[in-house]
Amino acid sequence: MASGFTGPQVYQQNFDPQVYLETYYGAVTGVFIKDGYMDFILKKLHKTFTTGGVRGEMMIDIGPGPAIYQELSACEAFKEITAADFTDRNREYLEKWRKNEPGLFDWTPALKLVCDLEGRSGKLAEKEEKLRKTLKKVVPCDVTKSNPLHPLLLPKVDCVLTVGCLECACKDEAAYGNVIKNLSSLIKVGGHLIIGSILGSTIFRCGNMQFSLINLSEAFLRKVITDTGFVIEDLEVLPREFDKPMFDICNHTSGIFILARKVKDVGKA
């Protein structure tokens, strides 16, 4: 990782939400469309929030960036969703989506898949409206803080979801372990932590910017999650089909989905 760790201020100053969405989720050409990762995550989340029985009053989506696809099934299982992201631009983009402003990224393929999974084919507008009503707040977040939502104080929630965030925010495994503890502090005992991530990666590109990623392994994630007071209820790895041009944009080897239930509080080191 020649460029070293990409600190938070680099995201604040240089991360472009629209370019990111087009690069990774753009119809046909997006990295996570071509390698099947978005479909994989959407299907796993659908299962989690239906037959998996994960539901409740409130869910916090940590580090969604400018994306909403990961909340499409959750809005049927939770009365309220709070989205929490570090960068001002991402929060502004989510607020524009909540207000249904024109000219934003088109989530039609994700909406169509989720509606089909739910047996509501064609109900795309209704699904978007349901999520807009359920996504009550968009707030600042810093996962490296003991209260990631500081200065906001919320009662402990039923579920924390984080997709494609933590591998960007942590410089090493020790930092990642602390972040899992910080996120655990937001969750009730008996509640759930859901992680969608990529393995084996060191960088991703967005426009002309390159950002660092922590190289995660399945074994490390299993250990850090169970060491932090969780029991893993579901874990699945999606091997990546090698595609050299896409590999230059983001060099991950596979995707991973983890559903874990909190069984106890573990004190911070």
Image (cartoon, rainbow, N blue to C red):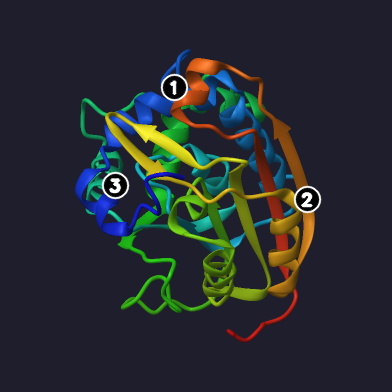
Pointer 3 residue: 90
- Name the residue located 20 percent from the left edge and 49 percent from the top edge: 13
The span from disc 2 to disc 3 (Cα, nearest Å) is: 29 Å
User: How many other residues sit within 10 Å of disc 2, few (<14), some (14-19) or many (≥20)?
Assistant: some
How far across and down, in percent of the image, does residue 209 sit? 29, 36
Question: Looking at the rendering, which quadrant does residue 99 occupy?
Answer: top left
Choose the circle earlier in sequence order: 1 or 3: 3
How far across and down, in percent of the image, does residue 147 sit? 43, 77
- Name the residue located 75 percent from the left edge and 58 percent from the top edge: 222
Choose the circle earlier in sequence order: 2 or 1: 1
Would you say 31 lies left or right of 8 here?
right
Would you say 44 lies left or right of 233 here?
left
Question: Looking at the rendering, which quadrant does residue 129 occupy?
Answer: top left
Instruction: Name the mark on residue 108.
Output: 1
The span from disc 1 to disc 3 (Cα, nearest Å) is: 20 Å
Would you say 185 lies left or right of 193 here?
left
Give SS at disc 3. Answer: helix
The span from disc 2 to disc 1 (Cα, nearest Å) is: 28 Å
- Tell which of 165 and 58 is nearer to you: 165
- Name the residue located 58 percent from the left edge and 48 percent from the top edge: 215
What is the three-letter code of the residue carrying label 1?
Answer: Thr
Instruction: Name the mark on residue 234.
Output: 2
Q: Which residue lies furthest to the top in this view?
A: 28
Give SS at disc 1. Answer: helix
What is the three-letter code of the residue carrying label 2?
Answer: Asp
Q: Residue furthest front?
A: 2
How far across and down, in percent of the image, does residue 12 sit? 24, 53
